[in-house]
Each structure stands twice: as C-alpha cells, then as structure tokens.
Amino acid sequence: MCFALSDYVPLLSISEVYMKRFFIILFAIFVSLSAFAKESASCKLISKQQAMERAKSQSGSKALSATLVQGKKPVYKVKVISDKGRIKTIIINACA
C-alpha cells in the first residue's frame, strides 16, 4: 500500500506561500519602523542657540554657527573660534 504525502500534509499553492512570505516581511518592516519612530519621538530637540551656548561653555571659545545633523542620534555641529583664531567644530547632542 502506498500513501502520498498530500494525504497527510495539506499542500499550499505557490501563490499562497508567496502571500504568507509577503505578509511576514510586511509585518517585520512595520515592527522595525514603529520601533524606530518610538526612538525618534522620545528625543526633544534643543534649539540652535542652546547648542551654541553649550559649545561656548565647553570650549571657552566664541560660537560662530550651528547646523543640525539628523542621524541615528541627532547632533549639532557647532563651529567655534578660539582666541588664537583657530576654527574648530564641536559636536553637541541635540536631545534635551
């Protein structure tokens, strides 16, 4: 007596297999994006003026400009000028 595998295991059509894979991938993307959104939303940004004041107090130099750089963690790149005229860039955490 010979039995076929299909007698024991219900077989899925190829399109059903691809649909399941599609929804699993879609779900994984949704979960990762929602985690990223929570991480970004938890950070309240400081103002450009506050970043320049922090750079001035850290370096003891005059702050010239500040630029917000959005990345994994947002930071300000603040350019300061020393008493000797040297220009440096100081990184300031943009989260309050």
Image (tube, rainbow, N blue to C red):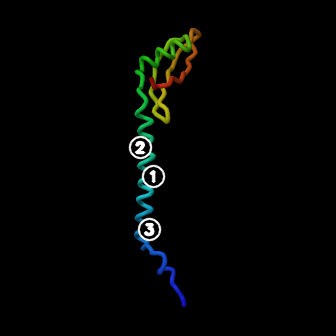
Q: Circle 3 sits in a helix, a strand or a loop, which is it?
A: helix
Within 10 Å of disc 2 (Cα), the crowding (few <14, some 14-19, many 20+) is few
Q: Which residue is mark 1?
A: 28
From the top left corner, tell me how far across and down residue 74 is, in percent.
47, 30
Q: Which mark is residue 84?
A: none
Q: Residue at x 48, y 35 (%)?
A: 71
As rendered, which of 89 and 8 lies closer to the eye? 8
Residue 75 horizontal/vertical position (percent) = 48, 27
Name which of mark 2 and mark 1 comes first in the sequence: 1
Task: Name the kind of residue labelled 2 in the image.
Answer: Ser
Quadrant in which residue 39 is drawn: top left
> Would you call the spot at circle 3 few (<14 residues within 10 Å), some (14-19), or many (20 or more)?
few
Label 3, on which residue? Answer: 17
Question: Amino acid under label 1?
Answer: Ala
**Lower position in the chain sequence, tag 3 or tag 1:** 3
Label 3 or label 2, whichever comes before in sequence order: 3
Q: Secondary structure at mark 1?
A: helix
The residue that disc 2 covers is 34
Image position of 70 with respect to 93: above or below: below
Q: CA distance from mark 3 to mark 1?
A: 17 Å
Task: Please name whichever residue, 72 or 2, is drawn nearer the observer in this view of the structure.
Answer: 2
Q: Are marks 3 and 2 in contact (CB under 8 Å)?
A: no
Rounded to the nearest angstrom, the CA distance separating label 2 from label 1 is: 10 Å
Q: Position of residue 1 (x, y in %)?
A: 54, 90
Q: Position of residue 20 (x, y in %)?
A: 42, 63
Is 37 placed above or below 50 here? below
User: Residue most toward the bottom?
Assistant: 1
Residue lying at 56% horizontally and 14% vertically, measured from the top left? 59
Please report the residue visible at 40 percent of the width from the left and 64 percent of the height from the top.
Answer: 19
Q: Answer yes or no: do the residues labelled 3 and 1 have beta carbons within 8 Å?
A: no
